[in-house]
Amino acid sequence: MARITRKEKSDGLYQAILTMKTEEEVYDFFQDLCTVTELRAMEQRFEVAMLLRQGMIYNDILERTGASSATISRVNRSLTFGHGGYQIFFDRQTQLEPPEKPPEDKT
């Protein structure tokens, strides 16, 4: 996939995102920055990525999310041949998940 050429103007956007400290700040920033349609499209692609990573098949993802097969395919290409952005998230999410507690012994 082609990487967008970095420019000062776009760098400002990414730097602005990095200044957000809480989920609420990020939410508010994206509410101001994007239209509802743009946000829903990004949220849908993210959900598709999560479901593909879990091994769900295209038809089930389409039914669950309403995403088109073209969107699902695009996200799958990004997961497989992209720049690794999704993988960075998946790796960090795994690191942040608390370990499972062993079942309590009830004897």
Image (cartoon, rainbow, N blue to C red):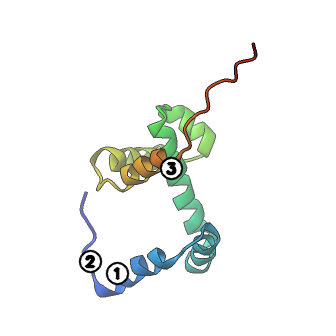
Q: Where 73 sits versus 18, above or below?
A: above
Query: Depth check: 103 or 83 in front?
Result: 103
Query: Depth check: 4 or 86 in front?
Result: 86
Asked whether the beta carbons under mark 2 and mark 1 sit within 8 Å of each other, the answer is: yes
Q: In terms of sequence position, does the residue under pointer 2 or pointer 1 come before the other? A: 2
Q: Which residue position is annotated with label 3?
A: 96
Q: Position of residue 45 (x, y in %)?
A: 50, 53
Q: Is residue 27 left or right of residue 48?
A: right
Residue at 55 percent across and 38 percent down: it is 99
Q: Position of residue 20 (x, y in %)?
A: 53, 76
Q: Which mark is residue 6?
A: 2
Residue type highlighted by circle 2? Arg
Q: Which residue position is annotated with label 1?
A: 11
Q: In terms of sequence position, does the residue under pointer 1 or pointer 3 come before the other? A: 1
Q: Quadrant of the C terminus?
A: top right
Residue 64 seen by the camera: yes
Residue type highlighted by circle 1? Asp
Residue 68 seen by the camera: no
Which mark's residue is nearer the viewer, 1 or 3? 3
Q: Position of residue 95 (x, y in %)?
A: 45, 47
Q: Position of residue 105 (x, y in %)?
A: 70, 19
